Structures are given as C-alpha cells and as structure tokens.
Amino acid sequence: MTDDQHALTNGSRASRPGFRRASRGTALVVIVGAAAFGLGLALRGSSPADSYGGLPSWLPKAKIAVNRTVQASAERPQLAVIEGDSVSVHLPHGRVLATAVGPAVPANAAQDASADADVTTCTFTVTLNTASGRVPISPRAFTIIDEQGQVSHLGVTAAGGGSPPTLVAHGRTVSLTLRSRLGEGEYILRWAPAGRKVLVGWEFNVELD
C-alpha cells in the first residue's frame, strides 16, 4: 500500500513529515496575523465593534438628548429650550406639557420683506396638553426677546382662528397660533403663564434667503 493509500484509509495525512511542517507553518502565520490584528486595535484604541457596525470611540458624545422633555417651574425656569422640545411646566396650581414649533415663514420670505427693513411674518404653533389643575392662557403671557434684549408681543389666536380659551381644561389639548414680524437673527419665544416671571423659553433663528 502506498503512503497516499495508507493516509486515505486512516482518514488523515498528519503522520507524514511534510504535512507536519506545513501545519506548523500555517499555525505560525495564523498566530502572527492575530497578534498583528490585536496590536493594531491597541494602537488605535478601538474595539472590533468600531470596524464592524459600532460607533468609533473618537466621535463626540451627545450632551443634550433630542426630543427630550424638560421640567420648568418658578424655582427652575428653562429659558434656552430647543424649538420643538416639550416642557413640563409646573404652575402654582397646575401643570401642563407645552411644545412650541416654528417659525414658519412664507415661501417667498425675501419678497415678503418690507421696504424699510428685512422682516417677514413668522408663525409659531404652541401646543398645550396633559393639563392638570388650573392652567391659564393669556395672549400677553407670550413674548419674544431678540439678541439686543428687546421684548415684543405676538398676535395670539386659537389654531383654527378666533380667540384662544382662557384655560386648558383637564384632559384637553389646546393649540395656539402665534405670529410676529421679525428680521433675521436669533430669538427666544417666551411664556410666563403665572404672572410676570418667564418659566420657559424656546430658542429659534430667522433666516431670509
């Protein structure tokens, strides 16, 4: 019986000296390759997840959650909330979830600008829901402050038109439409639902292209 026939019969060729040398060579290549891969990861300070679907460790970590709900009260007002975020507003005799979205500007905002100043009509939607206790609504409670500290009031109506209600009833949702003529710049839409003290402010920008 030849060496090849003997190997096939016994199911292995490991007894052949040449095969043992090849096996040792292959194992050495595998070990060296694995060591090089591990060294590369150590030098980069990364893990295999960085290369296979994970986020690289050098990316900046988000500090502010998106679409978050923050808490506002007279003791802890929130005056720099991102437009679109919801705020749980705590009042002396009630609580409500408030969200401000906007501004929406006309499609032809540049043509809408007046002759003496680059201003346009900005529209906001304020939604008040999940109310408990007494939550008053007053158009005078909404103001805008600009980068120079100038405060102005807005026109406030119910979302469908007409005067807004004076209270947010328990379990009901109230949507308000707010409008103001503004120029380019950074602003804060503010709400003082329980008197003169502002409890919440949403930051926004106006751009006229």
Image (cartoon, helix red, strand yellow):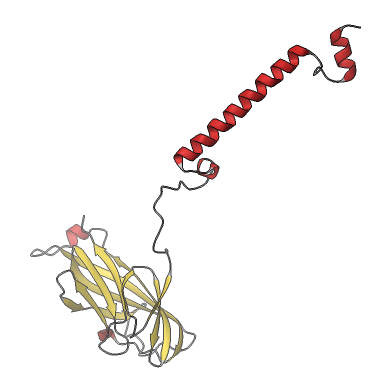
Outermost residue toward the left in this view: 116
Determine whether 139 is above or below 54 in the image.
Answer: below
Residue 14 shown left or right of residue 101 in the figure: right
**x and y percent of residue 167 in the render?**
38, 90
Q: Where is the N terminus found, in terms of image quarters?
A: top right
Residue depicted at 39% across the width and 69% down the height: 85
Determine whether 192 is above or below 16 in the image.
Answer: below
Residue depicted at 16% across the width and 74% down the height: 149
Q: Quadrant of residue 138?
A: bottom left
Determine whether 206 is above or below 88 in the image.
Answer: above
**x and y percent of residue 173 in the render?**
44, 81
Q: Nearer the viewer, residue 66 or 112?
A: 66
Count of numbered circles in the view: 0
Residue depicted at 18% across the width and 58% down the height: 110
Q: Quadrant of residue 32?
A: top right
Q: Where is the C terminus found, in terms of image quarters?
A: bottom left
Residue 124 shown left or right of residue 5 in the figure: left
Outermost residue toward the right in this view: 1
**x and y percent of residue 89 in the render?**
39, 82
Determine whether 24 is above or below 144 in the image.
Answer: above
**x and y percent of residue 100 in the render?**
35, 72
Residue depicted at 27% across the width and 59% down the height: 107
Q: Quadrant of residue 163?
A: bottom left
Q: Nearer the viewer, residue 180 or 52?
A: 52
